[in-house]
Image (cartoon, rainbow, N blue to C red):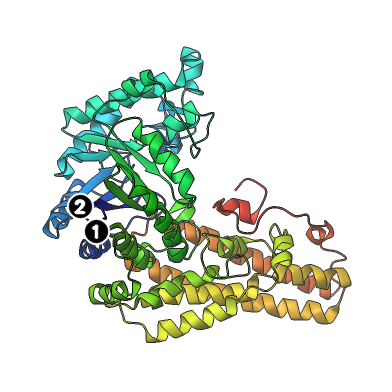
Amino acid sequence: MTKNYNTGVFICLSGNASLTVSSLKKMIKYLADFGYSYVELGLDDLFKIDEEPYYGYLRGAYSVNDLKELDSYAKSVGIELIPSAQCLGHFWVMSKLPEYEPIMDVGDILLIDSPRVKKLLDNMFSTLRKSFSTNKINIGFDEAHLVGLGKYLDQNGYVNRFELMLKHLNLVNNIANKYNFQCHMWSDMFFKMANHGIYYDKGVCFDENVINLVPKNVGLCYWDYYNDDEQLVSEMIKSHEQFNRELYFAGSISTCSGFAPSNKASLKIFKAQMECINKSSINNILITLWGDNGNDCNYFAALPGLFMTHEYAVGNYDENQAKKKFKRITGEDYDSMMKLDIVERNKINPKNEKVTLISKALFYNDPFMGLKDMEVKEIGYIPFAEAHQELDEEYKKTTANFGYLYKKLSQLSLFLSYKYDIGIRTRDAYEKNDIKKLKAVIDQYDLCISSLKDFRNAFEEEWKMDYKMQGWDVQELRIGGLLARLIYCRDTLIKYKNKEIAKIEELEEPLKKFGNLDSLFNIYRTFSTLRDL
């Protein structure tokens, strides 16, 4: 028999795009209608603090009044709105600001024991107390891999990093208690410090002294977005249960692997994970939406996945019944929205059952430098043209609610149908000095340039529907850079064809295999160049 889970959704707002207040209300209403009971807003530095004028500077930060309005609305539809604000790492934007750079230990990690850090944390909690009615808060604490190894090491010498992190956790917990907040946190740092930097592992045991040092009122959240190995997930849950604290399990509907969602793949993973959760002591389930490296994918494209994860959590695996319910709630056809995944359909991922980011890798793959071209040769034909046709048909027949999602991904697929193998065709024509092929590939560049402009316009239209404009600059700079490169490559080929130049230096260097095409390393600059960017 299925347990009565407390189910929620985590929405990252601090990556590169923050949903407008009206779009957040729309999302909260859908989640309430799906049956979720709470929503965590991943704010980090995306809220304004009177005492910290540079906190959230130029980032589209939410005011206290914005958050109070959202809190009130959420309560009116039966949702508990919970803030999430990092208290140790992930201060990557703030580390660029002169105001905060001195209190960074290394990279994006706060300098533990700094009086200025304590003041910042107090100001954060004070402002969040004014903004939210809940007593719960997610304090982050994840992925602070180098804590204690930067300025802290210079100033204090080496200190046991486990003890250092626990010292900071107790400070944060005390400040939270001062403002009547009860904390929960991501659990990975406990595992990595106890297990040679490894999070996902079987049979991880913790010393009783370590367990006792963790505040008893702090909940732990086991996050796992890609593992469907039931034995591994079960072992991870058992390791978490050693702490005897309130436990959360965080899965994901992937929106951080490029421009398209991975609903089907994420559901396949979560379905396997639910088998393990049902046998455990976990009562809190949290489904996350992340916007890593640009927020390329619109969060509303994850609605079918968010809906079905809740259905699984309440024990409903009857998809026909669930699809009818989805249609009643959203007015949208479930199978049609699942087609938003198909941009990532290819030989490696024929049924969309893997989370990949091939489309983003090939979007930014430079035609002359060709970091991904050897891998494209191996996979062969990629059906972007077919994806474009299917998505265009859905766009033409869809309701007014989410037509812009189909339009953007349809334009993306069309662009990629011209672009994905253009580097291979370029080198082939160049190496053979085949004038006919050179002319054909130059024409292909013209199609790419025109199509990229159409995609950019559709993407901007989508962005303006749901997000604040702070963050669009990142997309504009990246797409503009790609457009400039396409123009440069085309014009250089024209000069070579017309014998205005004797050779193209970039095309003289042979390519080597670089990495897996379906790698999940989602960093824009690694697709476009080996240089710093």
75 left or right, relative to 231 = left
Q: Residue at x 44, y 51 (%)?
A: 225
Q: Picture quarter containing residue 328?
A: bottom left
Characterize the local packing of mark 1: few (<14), some (14-19) or many (20 or more) Cα atoms within 10 angstroms. some
Front-lying residue, 247 or 384: 247
Amino acid type shown at disc 1? Val
Name above or below for residue 412 compared with residue 136: below
Return the x and y of residue 18 as percentages of the image width and height: 34, 55
**Residue 89 placement: quadrant:** top left
Query: Residue beneath label 1, please?
Result: 21
The span from disc 1 to disc 2 (Cα, nearest Å) is: 7 Å
Identify which residue is drawn at 40% across, 64% down: 298
Q: Examine the rendering and report whether any part of residue 51 can be seen.
A: no
Left or right: residue 208 versus residue 160 is: left
Q: Earlier in the sequence, mark 1 or mark 2?
A: 1
Question: Foreground residue, 507 or 403?
Answer: 403
Res 5 seen here: yes
Question: Looking at the picture, which amino acid does disc 2 mark?
Answer: Asp
Q: Relative to 370, does residue 406 appear above or below in the rendering?
A: below
Q: What's the residue at 11%, 58% (across, down)?
A: 76
Q: Which mark is residue 66?
A: 2
Q: Is residue 280 left or right of residue 148?
A: left
User: Residues at badges 1 and 2 in contact (C-beta under 8 Å)?
Assistant: yes
Query: Which quadrant holds the N terminus?
Result: bottom left
Residue 45 x, y percent position in the rendering? 33, 42
Location of residue 483 in the rendering, given as x and y in whole percent from the top left corner: 60, 67
